[in-house]
Image (spheres, rainbow, N blue to C red):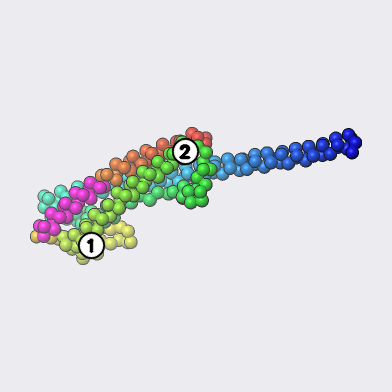
Amino acid sequence: MDLTSVSKYFWEFFMLFLAITLGFFIENYRLRLLDQDYELSMAKSFKSDLQKDQSHLDSIIARRKRRELQINFIIKTIEEKTFDVNGKELYLYARYLPRTPAFFTYDVTLKQLKNSGNLNIMKSKNVVDALLNYEHNVLFIDNIEVREERLVQRIFDQLNVLFDYRTFNEMNVYDIEFIAPRGETTFNFAAKEDINLFLSNLHYLKTVNVGILGWSIKLRKICEDTIKTIENTYQI
């Protein structure tokens, strides 16, 4: 084989090697761009989920504050025995006691990435840490709400003793709302032990409500900060 043939084979090999190498780098670059696009789309989805949570938390905070006022009204009315004046409101607020304002996070994107094992697509450690910290605080509120539900079960049993179920039945408007009773109302003041137990459970229910309210306000701030972290990191 002469020198010309060797040179020819070398250049053919070199051009083939160059083409394969270049193709490899181009494909890697294309995949990197796809990953970046996917990461950006996930960041936008996280922001959208958190904005939904933020709106829901605003509603929860308002309802928790209203619930605190209603519980205070029930306690004051029973303690001062002003049933003749406040009986209709007492019935209305008591009927809403079992209706706890529960918070449900909109965590579709986070669950999607965690379940598929693709959370590492988010390259920003600050964003991932912020999202996981937010999730941790959501779970903390969930645990308090479980305790609240146990108290609500006790309240249910006592409402049947102290209040007239027929009046409750007349207060139904549709599936999820109630109106104040129009006719006369009665309250079982003779059941002193049940009243004491009811007021005691109301105290615990009020305490839990205040706790969840405080954590909901804190969670809203964390939610807001997490949105800002995502916006600043991905310029969205």
Mark toward the start of the polypeptide (2 vs 1): 2
- Residue at point 43% right, 49% down? 106
Callout 2–callout 1 Cβ contact below 8 Å: no
- Residue at point 44% right, 39% down? 129
Give the number of the disc on residue 211.
Answer: none
- Number of other residues with Cα within 10 Å of mark 1, as a class: few under 14, some 14 to 19, many 20 or more: many
In the image, residue 52 above or below residue 174? above
Residue 206 falls inside the magenta stretch:
yes
Please name the amino acid that badge 2 sits on: Val
- Residue at point 28% right, 62% down? 172
CA gap, disc 2 and disc 1: 49 Å
Q: Position of residue 183 (x, y in %)?
A: 19, 61
* Image depth: mark 2 or mark 1 in front: 2
Q: Position of residue 91 (x, y in %)?
A: 20, 57
The kind of secondary structure element at disc 1 is helix
Q: Position of residue 178 (x, y in %)?
A: 28, 58
Q: Which residue is mark 1?
A: 168
**Position of residue 162 in the picture relative to residue 109 (left or right):** left
Residue 196 falls inside the magenta stretch:
yes
**Position of residue 30 in the picture relative to residue 71 (left or right):** right
Q: Position of residue 99 (x, y in %)?
A: 29, 55
Give the number of the disc on residue 127.
Answer: 2
- Residue at point 23% right, 50% down? 205
* Residue numbers of the magenta segment: 191-209
The kind of secondary structure element at disc 2 is helix
Q: Nearer the viewer, residue 149 or 188?
A: 149
Extreme-front residue of the structure: 1
Q: Is residue 162 visible?
A: yes
Please name the amino acid that badge 1 sits on: Phe
Please tell me whether the stretch drawn in magenta is mainly helix, strand or loop. Answer: helix
Report which quarter residue 179 is drawn in: bottom left
